[in-house]
Structures are given as C-alpha cells and as structure tokens.
Amino acid sequence: MSATAELPTKEAHVLKGHEGAVLAARFNGDGNYALTCGKDRTIRLWNPHRGILIKTYKSHGREVRDVHVTSDNAKFCSCGGDRQVYYWDVSTGRVIRKFRGHDGEVNAVKFNDSSSVVVSAGFDRSLRVWDCRSHSVEPVQIIDTFLDTVMSVVLTKTEIIGGSVDGTVRTFDMRIGREMSDNLGQPVNCISISNDGNCVLAGCLDSTLRLLDRTTGELLQVYKGHISKSFKTDCCLTNSDAHVIGGSEDGLVFFWDLVDAKVVSKFRAHDLVVTSVSYHPKEDCMLTSSVDGTIRVWKK
Amino acid sequence: MASDEEDFVFHGTPIEREEEIASRKKKAVAGASGNLRTLPAWKQEVTDEEGRRRFHGAFTGGYSAGYYNTVGSKDGWAPQSFTSSRKNRAGARKQSISDFLDEDEKADMEGQSLSASSQFDTFGFTAAEYSRKQVEKEQHERPSAIPGPVPDELIAPASESIGVKLLLKMGWRRGHSIKDVRASSGARREARKAFLAFSTDENTKETSDSVVSETEVETSLDPQFSEDIKMSESTPVYVLNPKQDLHGLGYDPFKHAPEFREKKRSRLSANKEAGFRKPLSMKESLFGPKSGKIAPGFGIGALEELDVEDEDVYGGYDFDQTYVIEDEQPAKPSNDNRLRLTSKEHDVLPGFGAAKNSDYSMERFSPPKIPKDFVARHKFSGPLEAETKPTLSAPPDVPPPADNNLKLLIEGFATFVSRCGKLYEDLSREKNQSNQLFDFLRGGNGHEYYARRLWEEQQKRGDQSKLTLDVKPSSSVQKMTAEERGSLLGEKPLQRSLKETDTSASSGGSFQFPTNLSDTFTKSASTQEAADAVKPFKDDPAKQERFEQFLKEKYKGGLRSTDFNRVNSMSESARAQERLDFEAAAEAIEKGKAYKEVRRATERPLDFLAGGLQFTSGGTEQIKDTGVVDMKSSTTYPKREEFQWRPSPLLCKRFDLPDPFMGKLPPAPRARNKMDSLIFLPDTVKAASALSESQEHKKETSIEEPEVEVEVENVERPVDLYKAIFSDDSEDDEDQVMNRKIQEGQEKKNEAAASTLNRLIAGDFLESLGKELGFEVPSDVPYQEGTKPMEKESKSRSKPEGSSDKRPDRSGFKQKVEEKTSSLTLGSEEEKSRKQREKSPRKRSGGNDLSSSESSGDERSKKRSSKMDRYRNNDSESDSSSDYHSRDKQSSRSRRKRRESSREKRNSHKKHSKHHRSKKSSSSKLVYSSDEDRKESKREKRRRRD
C-alpha cells in the first residue's frame, strides 16, 4: 500500500481547547498555522505542527461556522450564527469591522486572492460580497439567485463559486458576467476547488462527493462510502490533487483516489461527526475537526 | 494678672481674638501669593491656615474646587438630567434634611437622635407595636378561630398575654428567666400568682407564645422545674432542625452557591412529597434549562432568549454536567410507628417508662374475595352478543312467503336485528304487539323464513367480525377500520379473493377496504404476477410493497387508495419521485424487459432521490455498475444552465478585473424568479420528473427559456394572479410596470447614445453568424450598442442577450411551443440554442419598436410625475456609469438602493413559497437550515405583514 503511505493518516497532535463542537478548521495560506472555530463562539489560532494554542478570539455572539485567513496572515474573517461577518486583525485580536446584512446564519466566508473582499454564504440564500478596503459596511454585491441556503463558497481569481442546498453549484464569472449553474440534483454541502483550478468537488447530502469539470459542467467522478446526510461535513482535495478527502458523520475520514474513485484509505479520526477537513497547502498534513471538541493533526 | 489667672479654672479652649485670626490669615496669604499669581484663577485652591484644602461645607459644593469656586468641572454645572414628562412624570421629589447633609453631619445627627431600640425598650411603645405586628403576622398564617369573615377592627390580635403584661408590671423583662424573680420570696409568690393567672388566661385566648406558654403551664405546676424555665418570649422557639448530612458541624457546602441549595432542596422535597415548597420554582427556571437540549459548555446571555439554534444539533456527546457532588445522604427514618415510640421515649413523664411495644396497631382489612367465576372483562350485553354467539343450528331453509311485501319486511328486519342484536327484536315485538305485519316475530306467518334470514344474516356478520379480527390481530391499538365502519353502517361487505386478503393483510389492515373495492371493479391482471416475480425494489421491502400497491392501482384502475399518507416519513417530492420510479419500473415491466434492465432503470432515479432518504442499494453495487448508472444519470444531472450575471463595478475593481458591463445599463430586475415560482415547479422537482429522453429535452428547453430571456412588453403578465397572491404590494407592481416603461424609454435613449460603430460591428457579426447557419438576420439590431466584439465565439454568442439586458421576452413563452418542436427537429443542442437566439432578437426588435414608441408617448405624458423623476434620475446616472464609482453618493442613488433592496425582498419572499416547497424535499435533513426553517417562516410572515 504505497498509496496509503503517502497519506497523512498518523495522528501528530490533538488540539484541545474548544468547548463543544468544532465547526471548522483551516490552515492559513502557508500551512504553518491553523484557525479553528466552533460552537463555543471562539476562534482559536494554533500552531498545529507543535500542537499549541496561540490565541483565542472572542467576540461572536453565537457559534462560529467558518473562518478564513488572508494570504498575508494579517487579517482573518469569520462568520456564524450571529448573522454577521467579522473582519479581524490577527495580531491584536480586535474586530476591525463587522458586516451585517445577512438575514440568517452565515455558513461560509472566504477572502479573495488580494484579500480586498470577503464573500460570505448565508442561510438567507445569498452570497454577499463585503469590501475590506473601504469603510463601507454595505455589501458590494448581493448574489441571490440561489433557491436555498448557500452552504459553501470558493473564490478563484475571477470567479465566485457557491454551493447551495438547492442542489446547484453556481459559478459567477466576473470577466464575462455570467452565472453558470450546475445542478447536481442533490443538496450541496461543501465545495472545494482542485489545486489546478479545473475541477470543483462538491460534497452532497446523499453521502456522495461529486467531481465536476468546471469548464463543461460535466460530472467527472463520484465518490461514495462515507456518510453525509445531515451535517455540514467538509471535503477537500490533497495538495497534489491525487486524492479526495471527505469527512464522514461516523467519525471516519475517507481518502479516495481521484481518478478511479476507490477508497484508498479510511480511518477513524474522531468519535463523532467530522465537521471539517483541511489539507496543508504544501506538505502532507491534514487537519480534522469534530463535534467531539477536538482538532487532530494528521501527518504521514 | 498672673496671680489672678491662677485663681480661675478654665474649661474648654478660649475663643480666638479677631485680630489674631486676621493676622494669621494675612501670613498665609502672603506665603501663598507667589503660587497664586502663576496659576490660572480656576486652578487656584483655597487653603486654610495649615495649607490644607479648605472645606466649604455642604452647600457650597464641598471643597472649593476651582472654576471660580462654582463647580468641579470645566463644562459647568450639569443640570438635572431631563426626563420626558410624557412617559414618566417626574414625581414630586420629597426632600429631607438628610439629602443636604454630609456623612459626618449625618453621623452627628444620628448621635442626637439616640433612642432605645425595640429590643431594649421594655415598656415603650415600640416594643408593643413590634410584638403586635408579629402577632398579626402569625395570625394571618393560621386559620382564624372564628369562621367566616370577621372585621379586623373588632378583633385585634392581642400582642401579649395578660400574664406577660402582669409579669412586666412586676419587673420581669423579656428575655430574662423567671428565676431571677425568685430572688426574694415575696417576689416569687407574686410570680406564682402571675403564672396562675397566666395559665388560666392561656385557655381563653390565642397568643403568639402558645407553645412556650404551654410548657410553662406544665412546668409551673411542677415546682422542681419552674425555676429553670425561661420565659422566652423574645428567644426563639427551638426549631427542630436535625442535622441530616455528613458534613462537619457548621459546614455549609452551598455557602458560595446558594442556587444549588435550592436545587438540592427541591430534589429532596420531590422525593418526599409534592407541593412542599413553591417559591423556588421560579429560581429554578432561571437556572435550569428551559427546553430541549442546549449545546453544552457555555450559556447564552441572560437577556437572550433560548432559540432553536441554541439547541445542540450534534447531540450525543455529553460534556460533563456541572454538579455539586454531594456525598451526604441522610439516613431516612425507617418507620413511622417506631418513630412514634422513640419520640415518646424522649418526653415520657418522670417515673414512667415508654412502652416497648405499642398497643396501637393498624387495623388492616383484607381485600374482597373475587368470585372464582369472575371474568375480568366487560361484555356488552346487546348487539355483540348476537354476533359472538353463533346460532347453533341452522333453521331449515324455507321458501320465502308469497307476499312480497312481507318478504321484504322480514328480510329487512332480519338484517336489522342481526346488526342491532336480539334486544331490538324483543323491543319491536313488544312494540308491535298488535301489528299484523309483525306477526312473524311471534311465530305467525313467515316466522320460519324470518328465523332463517336472521340466521343467515348473523352468519354473514359473524364472518365479517371474525375476518376483521383476523386481519389485524397484531395491531394493538384498536382502530375502527373502514370495514368496521362500513359494517356498522350496514354496507354490504364485498366479496374478495383469498389472495387479495393476504396481501392487503400484510400491508396493514386499515387500507383493505379501498383495495378490495378496486378489486371488485377490476380483475387481477397478469402483469402483476410479472411484477411480483421481478421485484425491482427488493432491497427495500417497504418500497417494494408500495410498488406492488402502485401496480395494482395502475393496472386495475378503479379507485385510488389513499395509501400515500401511510408513508408519513416520505416528503412530498420523495413521494413524487418514487411514483416516477414506479412508473418507469412498471413501464419497463410491461414491455417485458429483462430484469437487469429494469433494475437499472429504477436504480437511476434512486440515486437522485431527493431528501434525506438513503438507499443502501447503491453502495453494495459494483463500481463498474455505478459507473454505468452514473453515465446514464449524468445525462440528466449535472445540468448546466447559464444566466447573465452582473457583477458590481466595485466588485470587478476589487478583483482587478475590467467590468464586462462597463458603460451599460444597470441590470433589469430579475423577474426570472417570480416567473419561475409562479408558473414552473422548482428545478429540482422538475428535473426529477425526467421520464424519457424526449421529455427531458422538452423540459430543458422550457427551463432554459424563461431564465435566459426574461420579460418582454407584449406578453400579458398574469397580473391578476400576482395581485391575488400579493395584494399588499399592488403599488409595487404598478411601480414595476412603470419601471419597465421607463426602461424602454431609456433603451431608446441609449440606443441613440450608442456609437454606430459598435452597432455596425455587432450587426456584422450577427449577420455573419446568421449566414453561417443559414438564417436571415434582421439588419436593424437595436440592441447591439454596448457590445464589444468578444474574443471567444462562445462568449460572443451569449452576448446578444447579454447586452439586451436580460429583459428580452416573455414572448419566449409563446414562442416556446413552436420552438420546442423546431428545436427537436434540429439535431444538436447548440444549433437549437443558436436558432433561438437568432429568433429572439428579431422578435424582440419588433416588439421593442412598438413598445418604445408607446413608451415614449408615455414618457412625455408622465414627465410631470415625481415618480418619473425618480426613475429618470437614476437612469441618467446609470447612463454615464463609466465613471460610476467615482461619483459621490447622491440621494438618488441611495434611493435607488432602497428600491432595489425592497425589490429584492419582494422577490425573495415571492420565492419563498416555492422555496419552502423545494426545501421540504431537499434540505429537510440539513441541520443548519432546517433548524432555522421555522424562524425563517416567521420572518417571512413578518415581512409580509409590512
């Protein structure tokens, strides 16, 4: 099993500190740090490679559902049940701005490449783009063509991609001003984009991950075996795009081969629902977070 | 002088002479003068002789504080804060002297008004008042001696007994023992007297110290003890409060957490009895969880309400509950009887011993004997009897009487009796004693026939009841089935085949009747056997069952059973989906396809079943097999649609991209959603109902069209429908109509403004495209103003509508039908879409010419109206939107924003109805969203009210 040897399946650290479920765990741009957030309304900054908690950010009024760091590690944004998007300063731990406007819980946030805007995906069936450069707290753009909760959002240099419970993955291309809607027929839980930018992986609530070709909208592959039916569980691709990773509701983490969709490896990462998986941008290292309140760092 | 002074004795300090003071002051001022000059006036401090800050007294603001000795702040005197007299009127503030006094002055005052505290005021009024109040309070607690309402003035509670009064008179003081009085024999005698008086008094009145005095009476009779007894009016009655825990003496585990004491007490009292204490319940509700499961580890603010989202969706993980661990558990008093004995032991009179075993024994009564033949079941005497007891021997079959009327009567009566029981027969026999017609009841004409008929009826009914019993022996809940009801109402039971009974019995008895009915209408089809053999849904027995049911209905016709509400767990769309599956499967079976094919055909939709339904079948299958399935499904599912989307200029700027819509019209309101929600089913449902290839094609076109090409003038909007549904925003509708007109006008304007060069380029392009495809292209293409030639063909192909600004046509609907056919004839989809696009601008242009001329007229006529102005305003702004974001914010812009947002809202809540429908199916299991479903709907309601 040379394939599994490449995969980060050995537990390197357990990051404990969150009280209650951890809802998301994200590496920063270079993979040296990790931000996690959870039901205890805090965001925590870790050094996952040494297993230490660096800082705790408190300001959210309800659970924090997603967090994303800028590429220069200076700022990060978070969102959650309090319907606001927070724009933070990493070092001081202060909230620089709060973006209000979503009519419901905010499920996901992302910065764009230049960290000039934050895009948030909300329960109010909209994607909202917030400006970080100006002092305006009004959304720059509201995309409300979704028919149901938007669960996940991904940005490229020119596009905004959102995955929604209405079963669509919608790509909004700013260059040509078009919206491409790929209907998968199943509620989309999480989307992530391949590192080459050609494919989008959509985790659907029928316990299936679907890989789509972005240019044609064609279904390239289907990955099954895990359970994802009622919780927001993440999926992602390894940094080499060789494998697909998905968390399962029974605490397992699955690795599929990208091409032939075989389950290459699966192992028990947590006791309870795996809410989030995040893969190191360069090394073979993975973060998983779970409802059991822990974040685990996995290495080769 | 010196000698003189020696003779006097001086008390106190002498008053200083005026001169001396003046001189000292002068000195002080001279010393400080250097400082004074340098400091600004308001910073100068007034000091006394010793250089201390001078104190001015209460009325001058305490220390002289600077600011010309007025106030302590630069800002001046802050007046009393204003309170609106509308809401809370400022009541007349009662001033007292203490308001104006300083602490020390108050202390001084206090010193002057020294008074005996009630505790020590033996004879004073306060003590009496105090005790009187005490008594009054106590009296309120216990039931009144005189029943019924008694005016309080008549019966004032006696604060103290006459005995106590006497004692007091004699010099006894509260809190002191009587023993002290004994000091002198005379006084002692007096005391004895007083006690006697006291004890006699005791019987007649109710006093506060009844407990105490009772013991006193006893003990006063006993000379030995009388000395030791203390008159403890003011000393508290000893309360029996046994120490029941295992803590150390005086240790209070709840010292710092009194709320847990309440909790513990409540637990204890809950163990003992209910209704012991009430007031803590409120406190408990404050601390205890209110509803459901709350996410552990942290609480929400005291001011926040517990919401749905605070419930722990990830249940199952128990974070340690914070309990105060109590190790002590009081030893419970084991037995009442023994307790009584032991308690007796304590207060036995001297010289007596407590009985070892008490005479008192509870008299016990043994329960009544149940007669042996008693059956613990109630039997109905009347009608059931007739049914349960089968007629033993069948009466001989007799030919009916010749009289047809009589025969009918007998038959009717027999059925009636069989239904209602023997009782009815007896009754009617008595009633119709004299009636000739009812002779058959009394053994007259036709009696045999009647007996026979009755027997037959009873037999029939017996069968029925037996059957119903057979059908549902398992169901514990006795529900009235349709059959029972029918039989009660006297409906004729239907004949059924044996096999039918079996299947229906397995599917639950409650739906037997309709299926039977359908059976009676149709004969069993051969296809059913085929379906039975095939069993396409064998993975899921429940589904298979439903499928069989479905087949039965499909091929046998007749009445549709209301079977579907049985499957409550299925969502609406899942049900619809399943039905489609069934249809497909049935069709396949009918065509006699091979089993494998059937399986595949049915498998496909299975994978895409909406909602949280899970099908295990997919997982077990071979990967290759799923691959095949996926290839098949991929033709339906990852379905790509394209719409126009306009990124805001600022967004493009932030992404460092050129705005593709630079210098173009602002986007028209997206009416697509509205249209969709009113006319079309949600996409998911639509897509789910893909039956065959051709149908799919049709659908796709029908979906695409309304989305790609939206709103055109010459289609009559179903305004009535809108109004019926959203009557409250009729004004907005009007606005929209206006808006549209204005936009047309604006388009025209734009047209004029657009460069001819652009138009030519675009026109050329279109023309060439048309030639390529062999279509005729209209030379006049009014919509090509803003388009730049695109680098890619595909992009440019999409461009024409893009520039036409999203509003092209509703006429697409009308076209749709023709187009559908035409598109079907065309081979490739690309060509089809191209053709559409060729067609639509043509139509559009025609329509536009018309409408624009119309609207220009309109425009002129409406120029006066303010609304118009508003629109024009923002039109003009957007016209020159090349320097869009460099503009400063104008009021008009913000106004437009508001409008937009309101439109959005409206759109969104129009979407809602549909949204909810689709949601039920798609996201019902998604935790984040379903949580909020309720709230969302609430919100929506609120919005609608607005």
Image (cartoon, coloured by chain):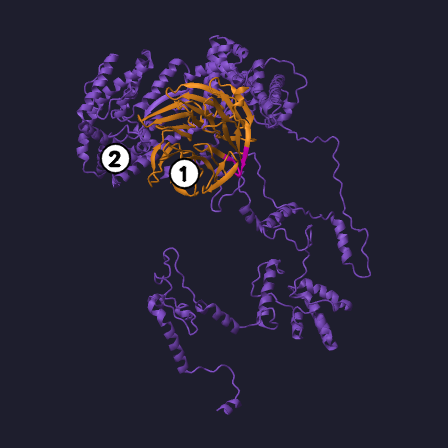
Nearer the observer: mark 2 or 1; the answer is 1
Question: What stretch of residues is rendered in magenta?
Answer: A13-22
Pick the residue in front: B423 or A291: A291
Q: Mark number for residue B884?
A: 2
Q: Residue at x 67, y 63 (%)?
A: B210
Q: Secondary structure at mark 2?
A: loop
Q: Residue at x 18, y 26 (%)?
A: B755
Pick the residue in front: A136 or B142: A136
Pick the residue in front: B223 or B915: B915
Letter of the chain shown purple in the rendering: B
Q: Secondary structure at mark 1?
A: loop
In the displayed structure, A135 sits above or below B595; it is below
Instruction: Please tell me whether residue B737 belongs to the stretch shown in magenta.
Output: no
Residue B383, horizontal then vertical, whole percent: 62, 26
Task: Say which residue label 1 marks.
Answer: A74
How crowded is the residue under tag 1: few (<14 C-alpha within 10 Å), some, or many (20+)?
few
In the displayed structure, B550 sits above or below B336; it is above
